[in-house]
Amino acid sequence: MHFIRRAVLTVAAVCIAVPAFIATPAAAQDAPIFDQVPAVMYETYRGVNNPAFNDYFAMLVEKYGGTGGHPWAIYRENAKVAYRITVLPEGMPSMLPIQQARVESFQEFDQAQMDMWNAGWGSRHVSIWNTAPAMSVVPDRFTVDDIRALPYNRVVVYHLKWNQAGAFREALRARSALDREAGIEGLVQTAWNGGIGTNAQVVMVRYSSESELALLESRGARMEARAAYREEWQAHNRAMNDAAYRIERHDQRRINDLSYSGN
């Protein structure tokens, strides 16, 4: 059971959804989402066996149904990479009770279910990410209830040069402030500072939408809205890129059938 205990840490990359309303952009940093989701656990599975992985989490959804347990979301990057998501509503102090509750439930798994666990999961890595409101762009009334509305996320992870982390964050704060002031419709950009389990200096930026197509179709509107400050925006963007020694880009799509709402 040792590996089972180690594997109970669940992680959450929060997939933010575009709400139906347009909010006052100047107040975006004070949106309720930043109080409700101050941090997430982000559990990455690489080399997963798709059928077994799906079967295992489908079993978990059924097992936890009606228990009111801690919710999670499953996201797929591709056929070999998946993520398990759990919000930390009180930041790091939330980790221990979530772990304890899941360890206790895992004691009830039979051998066949444990075999399914082993077959479904390949390598696994847990990291903690803390939200960065000043570097984000979301509607001011945006809440955790909006998270599930948009299942698609374009994720950009900036691995920062050790002496350029401050310059990167300042550039992202300035770029985000421009977008908030412009009130760009449909833009939901959340930024996250890496914590435990990440590189010393890393920032994740997530752009969330209903679908990849919807995000692409909104590009023209974003460019038009930025016309008045395009040069300044691009200068901040260049500064961000220059401050990174590596930039990762990938897509994530929420798998609702494998996600547990906690109800």
Image (cartoon, grey):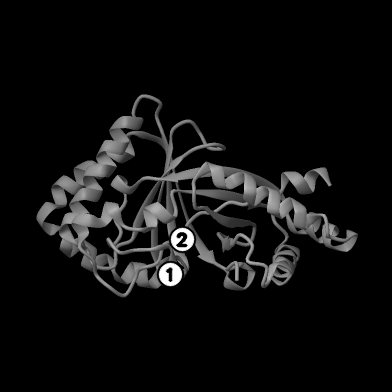
Q: Quadrant of the C terminus?
A: bottom right
Label located before the other in sequence (2 or 1):
2
Q: In the rendered image of this protein, does residue 39 appear above or below residue 106?
A: above
- Label annotation for residue 150: 1
Q: Position of residue 60 (x, y in %)?
A: 72, 65
Residue at 75% over, 59% down: 120
Q: Residues within 10 Å of mark 1 (few under 14, many from 20)?
A: some
Q: Amino acid at mark 2?
A: Cys
For label 1, the SS is loop
For the residues marked 2 and 1, what is the alpha-carbon distance in whole angstroms? Answer: 7 Å
* 101 or 76, nearer to the observer: 101
Q: Nearer the viewer, residue 234 or 207?
A: 207
Residue density around tag 2, few if under 14, some if 14–19, many if 20 or more, within 10 Å: many
In percent of width and height, residue 169 lies at: 31, 37
Rendered location of residue 114, percent (x, y)? 83, 57
Reply above or below: 146 against 105: below
Could you tell me if the residues under marks 2 and 1 are in contact, i.e. CB atoms within 8 Å?
yes
Q: Is residue 245 left or right of residue 255?
A: left
Can residue 8 be spotted in the picture?
Answer: no
> Which of the two residues, 60 or 244, is positioned nearer the viewer here?
60
Q: Is residue 120 left or right of residue 23?
A: right
Which residue lies under the disc numbered 2? 15
Tell me what residue is drawn at x 59 percent, y 62 percent.
Answer: 71
Q: Quadrant of residue 12?
A: bottom right
Q: Is residue 260 left or right of residue 164?
A: right
